Image (tube, rainbow, N blue to C red):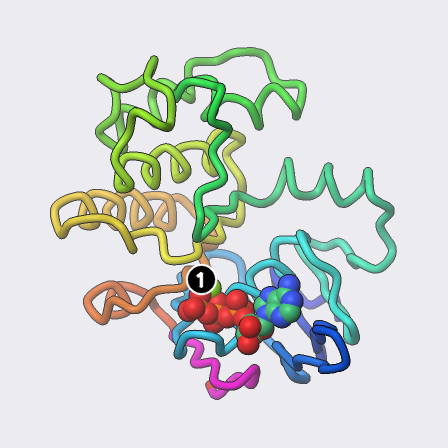
Amino acid sequence: MNNGHIIELENVSKNYQRGPETVHAVKNVSLSVSSGEYVAVIGPSGSGKTTLMNIIGCLDHPSDGRVMINGREIQDENESGLTRLRQTSIGFVFQQFFLIPTLNVIENVTLPALFAGHKPNGRGRDLLEKVGLANRMHHLPGQLSGGEMQRVAIARSLVNAPPILLADEPTGNLDSKNAGMIMDLFGKLNADGVTVVMVTHNTDIVKRCNRTVHIEDGVIRQ
Ligand SMILES: Nc1ncnc2c1ncn2[C@@H]1O[C@H](COP(=O)(O)OP(=O)(O)OP(=O)(O)O)[C@@H](O)[C@H]1O
Ligand SMILES: [Mg+2]
């Protein structure tokens, strides 16, 4: 299965147990993404988009199937190997941001660099400028608007310069001007070779991607 794809899923399923009921969130999905692609994932609420992103982002294990990310077979990795893979290869923009409330904006953005053992290099500051938040560096998340928090989360996802960017509704809370700014940033990153996989409901944004993956009821229809 090592054939140049930066992301490869083979017959991946994910089941969740909710009491006596089994939820089949992702069903036998196979998906290959080449390095440098810009993929939109679309589908109705509850169709399995976040579940799929969490599996690609090595945040969740599949119930069945194989996952290969940036040349690594996920099932062969232990927890520290997976942590390292996430730190070096994947930027993740969560649907719910997950900022740390007691850390200010610049601290939130640079935290993944700290965890990865990188020396301070000013990249966090540059990214905050790029997302239009240079004047919010020392605010706490609770002092920001939803759209500002989303932009902090985007800056944080990019601080380790990952070759893969996974973004779950990254413009969901943004007005058209800020959404446009984020899309320009993603477009530039993609032009520089970053592989982008993004969940979105926005049809204008889908048009900017070079491929669309439809997911419905846990099944991909390409
Ligand atoms: N931890 C969990 N335990 C049980 N069921 C879950 C869990 N997480 C997700 N599900 C279920 O799996 C299905 C897929 O959820 P998922 O979050 O992937 O959908 P989604 O496509 O991201 O939806 P949305 O567009 O609303 O974000 C849903 O039916 C959801 O209720
Ligand atoms: Mg979701």
Q: Is residue 49 visible?
A: no
Disc 1 element = loop
Position of residue 135 measured from the top left corner of the image (x, y, whole percent)? 22, 17
| Above or below, 78 relative to 32 | above
Q: Is residue 168 left or right of residue 144?
A: right
Name the amino acid type tagged 1: Glu
Residue drawn at the location 35% of the way across and 49% of the way down: 191
Q: Give whichever of 102, 157 is nearer the camera.
A: 102
Q: Is residue 121 left or right of residue 191?
A: right
* Disc 1: residue Cβ within 8 A of ligand 1's nearest atom: no
Residue drawn at the location 29% of the way across and 55% of the way down: 172
Q: Give whichever of 219, 163 is nearer the camera.
A: 219
Magenta-tinted stretch: 212-221
Q: Give whichever of 38, 206 is nearer the camera.
A: 206
Queried whether the magenta region covers residue 66, the answer comes back as no
Dominant SS in magenta:
strand
Residue where numbered disc 1 is placed: 37
Residue drawn at the location 64% of the way across and 36% of the way down: 87
Position of residue 190 measured from the top left corner of the image (x, y, whole percent)? 38, 50
Residue drawn at the location 55% of the way across and 23% of the way down: 111
